[in-house]
Amino acid sequence: MAMTFYDLLGIPKCATPDEVRLGFKKKALTTHPDKLGPDATLWDRKAAETKFRNLHEAFETLSDPAKRRAYDMRLEAAARFLRTGREREFDTTYAEHIKKSAEQLNVTLQEISQTQQKLNGMVDDLLKGLREANPEWEARKLEALRQREAHSTRAS
C-alpha cells in the first residue's frame, strides 16, 4: 500500500495535534534540502525538495482538523474499495475452486461407479464359473433356503 501522510510523519493515525507537529519537526530536521552538504548533486537537491514538499503537505493536512477529517475519509474510502475488490476476487477464486472441485468429484464418482460395475461383473463371472464347476453348491444353497423358510414359518 502507498505511504500515507501518517507514515511520512512517522506518527499513528490517532496522533494529537502536538504529535503531528513534533513528527513534522523530527522529519524536517533530516529531510530539509538545506541539510544537504555542499557536495550534494542537483538530483539530490531536487529529491530532497520533493520529499520536504510532501512532508510539508502532510503536516498542513494533518494539522488542520477539517482537512484531516477529509483526508481520513478518503483513506477509509480507498481502503474499503481495496477490500471490496479483494473480497470480490476471493469470491471469484473460491467459486472457481469449488466448481473445479465439484467437477473432479463427479469424474471420480463416475470412475468409481465404472470400477464397481466391472468388479461386480467379475464377481458374477467367478460365481457363475464356480457354480458350473460345482453344481452341488446350488443344490446346497437351495436346501439351506428351504430350511430357513421352514424354520421361520414354524417360529411364527
Image (cartoon, helix red, strand yellow):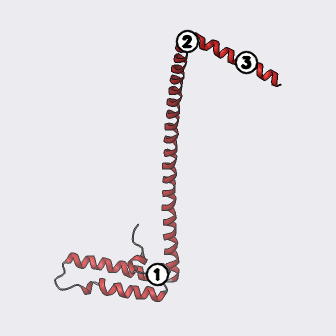
Q: Position of residue 86 (x, y in %)?
A: 48, 57
Q: Earlier in the sequence, mark 1 or mark 2?
A: 1
Give residue 147's mark.
3
Element carrying mark 2: loop
Q: Is residue 16 above or below residue 70?
A: below
Q: Position of residue 4 (x, y in %)?
A: 42, 73
Q: Nearer the viewer, residue 136 or 123?
A: 136
Element carrying mark 1: helix
Gap in Å between the C-alphas at discs 3 and 2?
A: 21 Å
Q: Nearer the viewer, residue 58 or 8?
A: 8
Q: Nearer the viewer, residue 153 or 21?
A: 153
Q: Is residue 140 above or below residue 67?
A: above
Mark 2, residue position: 134
Dot 2 alpha-carbon crowd within 10 angstroms: few under 14, some 14 to 19, many 20 or more: few
At a point 37% along the width and 80% down the height, the residue shown is 55
Is residue 112 left or right of 28 when viewed as pictured? right
Gap in Å between the C-alphas at discs 1 and 2?
A: 97 Å
Q: Amino acid at mark 3?
A: Gln
Q: Where is the C terminus found, in terms of image quarters?
A: top right
Q: Where is the N terminus found, in terms of image quarters?
A: bottom left
Give residue 62's mark.
1
Of marks 1 and 2, the one in the foreground: 2
Q: Amino acid at mark 1?
A: Leu
At a point 46% along the width and 79% down the height, the residue shown is 12
Q: Earlier in the sequence, mark 3 or mark 2?
A: 2
Dot 3 alpha-carbon crowd within 10 angstroms: few under 14, some 14 to 19, many 20 or more: few
Q: Nearer the viewer, residue 85 or 109?
A: 109
Gap in Å between the C-alphas at discs 3 and 1?
A: 97 Å
At a point 42% along the width and 82% down the height, the residue shown is 59
Give residue 15's mark.
none
